[in-house]
Image: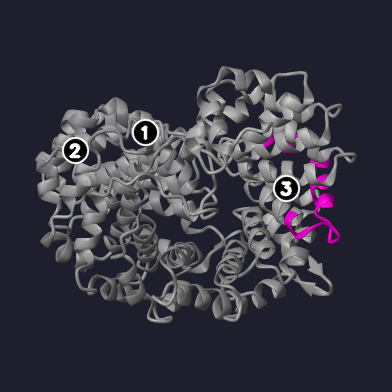
Amino acid sequence: MALEPFACFMDVENSRSYIDELYSDDIYKCQEAIVCLKNAVIGSNKKKGSVISQGIVPRLISLLRDDTKDPSLQLDAAIVIGSLAKGTESQVHSLIYYETVQVLLNIVLNPGTDRRLMETCLGALKTILQYPFAPIELLHCNIGNLVRLIQLASPSSSIQCQVYVANIFVPLCHSSHQQKNLCQANVIPFLARLMTTQHTILQVPALKCLAAMCFTNKYVSDIVCMTCHEERSILDILTGLLSRTRDVQIQLSASRCLTYLHRSGSLRADDYRIVYKTLPSLARLCSEDFDEETRATAAETLAYLAEIDSELQRLAAISNHLICSLANLIRCPSPLSRQGAFRCFASLAANDEDIRKRIIEMDGLMEEVLNGLKDTCPEVRTPQIQPTHSLNRLQSIPKVRLSAVRCLHSLSRSVQLLRTTFQDHSVWRPLMDLLVGEPSLELLTVVTSTICNLLLEFSPAKEPMLDSGAVEMLCELTKHSDPALRLNGSWALMNMAFQAEQKVKSKIIDTLGTDRIFQLLSDSDERVIMKTLGLLRNLLSNTLHIEIIMSEHSSEVLRAVNLVLDGPHPPEVKEQALIIISNITAGARDKDYVMEDENIIKKIREFLVVSDNKLQMGAVFVVRNLMEKGGRQKMLRESGILENLEQLLHMTPRDSQFYEDIRQEILRFDFSDDH
């Protein structure tokens, strides 16, 4: 006789005999045990955990893959596994450990599988694959697997089957390779068909999958833009789905697809679908007429849409009272809402001073931003807004805090705000506090980018930051393995050295060390080299300071300059080295540092007649500064510099305006020998 459900629950947790019956060769006893098990685990994570901890999963898998057993036994085993898959994350980890995904996939892909069993296994597979640690490579190892899934979801199959397949495809786009795999399996036409059905449960996952495929992938996005379904382009289908008569999730998902098509480079920023359809739709979805999660996701998507285009930022700022909507959203309790609002504010304020002014004038906005810096909520991931890299899977990043710092970074580009609001709230203090401990790489990058702006010469925060150890922190940052952080460190030091007092410059040199400067000038990232040269240029920018620094570090400075002049760098990099040389020749009074360096003189002579305007003009400025001091014309003539200068004067112009400027500069020189 079958046991009552309550007794079943007790047996699952306490009875060894019950487990024994599951392993029985008596089909009736085994069937009775698995039915009881099926009823017990539904809706109870505790009982799911008990089943897994007692080692029952391997038996379930054995029953599932044994097609010699009664089909109803296989089906019940699949149902139990599907139920276990809806448990906790650790319970799903256990299922994956026992290679459940491979077993489910084999059954699904087998053409001879019973329809009910196939759909049940599809459902379990869909549930497990939503987790970022799921072995999705099992599906990608053979494009035939993807093709077979599409065949299973043919128009003649059940709606439920199509829903399962559509949802299975959504998390299969973590990388460019995976996106292209789906494309080669003809997933795009399949998704287009689902998007044109009248079933929201099919349209939403289809749109999510399409968005994921297009994310930062121009190859796939171009194909999407060229694909049609029943004589309608996908672009027209997506645009139609933005209609207010559509389900809100469909409007939002279609907006994200068009956003990613734009950001991948397949749709121009001035395309009417972006300007008049996508942007207004997202701005409208940020309003209080919609639920909090919709508003938050719309805000984050809109931030990404307008992130790199100043005209889209301007249009967004005047669309549908967006700034007021974001100010309301930022006060909502959920981390997702604050995250989306902060990030959208950051995007809107990236380039326009008037927009920054409108944002900062929102009542209590700066207090909300500063509160956001203190947020310690775990990572909140908006699906498909960002790629799911392995680093993001493992690291818990307080995204509210990160988005708040991004907002501050955009606002810190305003000279007026640096001198007023940022000073009134001592914004530099919480930013410096964020550097303590072990902040994530992403957070550290944005914080240090903001600090670069706070260290500009006109910022009142510069002095207190210097007193709080900013020099030591930035010098340490230049040693980081990440190029973006080395860039920020050298950039901030460059800003700090601009029109700084001699004691500040000396502290930078002593703390950074000349060996580190040489390493930065040999960096693999050209931007780091440029900012380090900018740092040297600012250090050597005052006559008195040049005298002091060169008297103590002349050999190191000249070695650094020669390192750049001799290196395989583009003209704009070597131009910065020439400006430093020009500063030295103008500022050093006691010693001819440049004239005594044979390699520099040789390079100046060569640059006067090279086919590059930057190098020629830089070399001319160096010669001009050299000739302003008496007693050097003879040395310059003997070195061949004056001969090349005269040759430059009579060269056939390639750029008439440039050569007229340089000609006028040269004509001011005195070419007569000294007496």
Q: Are marks 1 and 3 in contact (CB under 8 Å)?
A: no
Quadrant in which the N terminus is drawn: top right
Report helix, strand or loop for mark 2: helix
Quadrant in which the C terminus is drawn: top left
- Give whichever of 547, 294 is nearer the camera: 294
Q: Are marks 2 and 3 in contact (CB under 8 Å)?
A: no
Report helix, strand or loop for mark 3: helix
Residue at x 43%, y 33% (from the top left corner) = 523
The image quarter in which residue 117 lies: top right
Q: Say which amino acid is labelled 2.
A: Val
Numbered label attached to residue 520: 1
Determine if the magenta segment contains residue 137.
yes
Q: Are marks 2 and 1 in contact (CB under 8 Å)?
A: no
- Sequence order check: which comes first, mark 2 or mark 1? 2
- Residue on which disc 3 sits: 180
Q: Is residue 617 visible?
A: yes
The image quarter in which residue 460 lies: bottom left
Residue density around tag 1, few if under 14, some if 14–19, many if 20 or more, within 10 Å:
many
Foreground mark, 2 or 1? 2
Residue at mark 2 to residue at mark 3: CA–CA distance: 47 Å
Q: Is residue 675 visible?
A: no
Q: Say which amino acid is labelled 1.
A: Leu
